[in-house]
């Protein structure tokens, strides 16, 4: 890729990022894009802390939110390879007291595979109004309730009725927090230690953990508001559909808070790109090619997921019909995000890996800004392809 055409890609992305920060659509951001393992664009713009004038840098640490799920899924498959667990093991093999029931009172079989594919029948409180069963039970989505133990949250979750029999439908949920406790027990160590041994350690992801390695590098979280994003308080609600996302940004600083396998990690964009690249290029040194293939393959059949044209693998959303999403991404693209304001995708067919981390919920995760970043990347790469 010569300098002239690379500059064309950079110009497109610079314009999108500068517009987003200058208009205060997001407060701060880091974007990394790689093609076939080579970084073709990187930038850090805006404020890590707006009020003190502290700028974002490439190594700013962000709250990963649901980017955590990628690490939990990888660790689970690594334990499957070791024979410590099996995908069709019942959840009760590791969590004997976790026995949620259908509204009828029936207690159906729930497996690790159901948890990984979000077909367990569990839910998230963020999808409910204040009278919903998860709210009534006091169940946490893994981003609030400082000091809450995993044992107590599992009890609260299990007290709410399942939405459907496991395997019969798809619904995004607290399942990866349940899975996190399973792999902690199967791995014989607390979840942070298991993730460190199986994922972050082998890849040298030294800035990724359940506690920020350096709080001075941690971005301040902000939430969508008018006329500009507002700084999150110690407890903060962000409207989302019929409900709201409940944040307690400093929950992990309370040592009694359970490590959320679905939303509890901190990290940097370079670390997360390192993980995506390891998976895109075959899985080593984390997983065998066979396990990596499970993450790249539809595992939910024809079940409807959040986005038309997308299914779910054992770890994330898989695009199978771009015509239904009006996206330039290729069939087979992996994608997901995190509600603190993050998004990512991997287009294996074109060798593209992209990580966008922001400190603005939820504008950095979904909507006009991440869509504009995506379109600028594909527009720039198409322009480059036409000139070489």
Image (cartoon, helix red, strand yellow):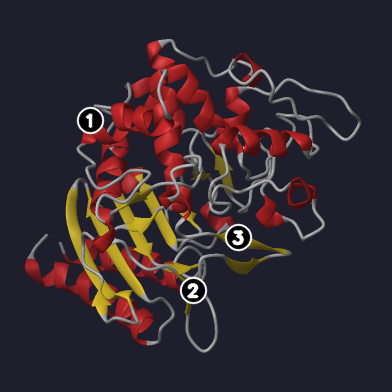
User: Element type at marker 2?
Assistant: helix
Residue 285 versus residue 353 in the image, above or below: above
At a point 27% along the width and 68% down the height, the residue shown is 380
At a point 54% along the width and 34% down the height, the residue shown is 298
Label whose residue precedes the other's in the sequence (1 or 2) = 1
User: Element type at marker 3?
Assistant: strand
Q: Which residue is mark 1?
A: 202
* Nearer to the camera, 8 or 184: 184
Residue density around tag 1, few if under 14, some if 14–19, many if 20 or more, within 10 Å: few
Residue 93 falls in image quadrant: top right
* Nearer to the camera, 377 or 269: 269
Residue 31 falls in image quadrant: bottom left
Q: Give the label, 3 or 2, closer to the camera.
A: 3
Q: Position of residue 281 (x, y in %)?
A: 26, 35
Q: Position of residue 196 (x, y in %)?
A: 31, 32
* Nearer to the camera, 359 or 312: 359
Query: Tag on residue 246?
Result: 3
Query: Tag on residue 368?
Result: 2
Determine the residue located farthest toward the left in the rendered image.
3
Q: Position of residue 122 (x, y in %)?
A: 70, 38
Residue density around tag 2, few if under 14, some if 14–19, many if 20 or more, within 10 Å: few
Residue 207 versus residue 112 in the image, above or below: below
Left-right relation of 164 to 276 = right
* Cα–Cα span, label 1 and label 3: 33 Å
* Nearer to the camera, 62 or 280: 62
Left-right relation of 13 to 183 = left
């Amino acid at each position: 890729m010569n300098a002239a055409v690379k500059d064309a890609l950079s110009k497109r992305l610079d314009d999108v990022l500068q517009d987003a920060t200058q208009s205060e659509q997001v407060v701060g951001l880091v974007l990394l894009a790689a093609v076939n393992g080579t970084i073709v664009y990187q930038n850090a713009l805006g404020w890590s802390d707006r009020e003190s004038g502290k700028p974002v840098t490439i190594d700013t640490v962000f709250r990963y939110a649901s980017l955590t799920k990628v690490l939990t899924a990888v660790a689970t498959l690594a334990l499957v390879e070791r024979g410590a667990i099996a995908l069709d093991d019942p959840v009760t093999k590791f969590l004997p007291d976790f026995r949620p029931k259908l509204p009828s009172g029936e207690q159906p079989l729930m497996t690790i595979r159901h948890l990984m594919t979000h077909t367990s029948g569990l839910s998230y409180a963020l999808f409910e109004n204040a009278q919903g069963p998860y709210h009534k039970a006091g169940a946490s989505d893994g981003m609030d309730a400082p000091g809450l133990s995993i044992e107590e949250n599992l009890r609260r979750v299990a007290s709410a009725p399942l939405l459907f029999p496991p395997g019969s439908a798809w619904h995004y949920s607290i399942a990866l927090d349940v899975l996190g406790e399973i792999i902690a027990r199967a791995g014989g160590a607390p979840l942070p230690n298991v993730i460190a041994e199986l994922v972050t350690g082998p890849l040298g992801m030294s800035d990724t953990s359940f506690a920020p390695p350096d709080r001075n590098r941690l971005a301040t979280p902000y939430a969508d508001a008018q006329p500009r994003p507002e700084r999150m308080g110690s407890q903060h609600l962000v409207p989302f559909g019929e409900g709201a996302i409940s944040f307690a940004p400093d929950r992990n600083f309370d040592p009694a808070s359970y490590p959320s396998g679905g939303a509890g990690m901190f990290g940097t964009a370079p670390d997360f790109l390192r993980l995506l690249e390891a998976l895109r290029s075959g899985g080593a040194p984390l997983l065998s090619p066979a396990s990596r293939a499970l993450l790249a393959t539809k595992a939910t059949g024809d079940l409807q997921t959040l986005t038309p044209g997308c299914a779910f693998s054992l770890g994330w959303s898989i695009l199978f019909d771009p015509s239904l999403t009006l996206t330039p991404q290729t069939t087979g693209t992996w994608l997901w995000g995190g509600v603190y304001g993050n998004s990512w995708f991997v287009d294996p067919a074109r060798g593209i890996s992209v990580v966008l981390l922001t400190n603005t919920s939820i504008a950095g995760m979904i909507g006009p800004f991440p869509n504009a970043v995506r379109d600028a990347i594909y527009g720039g790469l198409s322009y480059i392809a036409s000139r070489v």
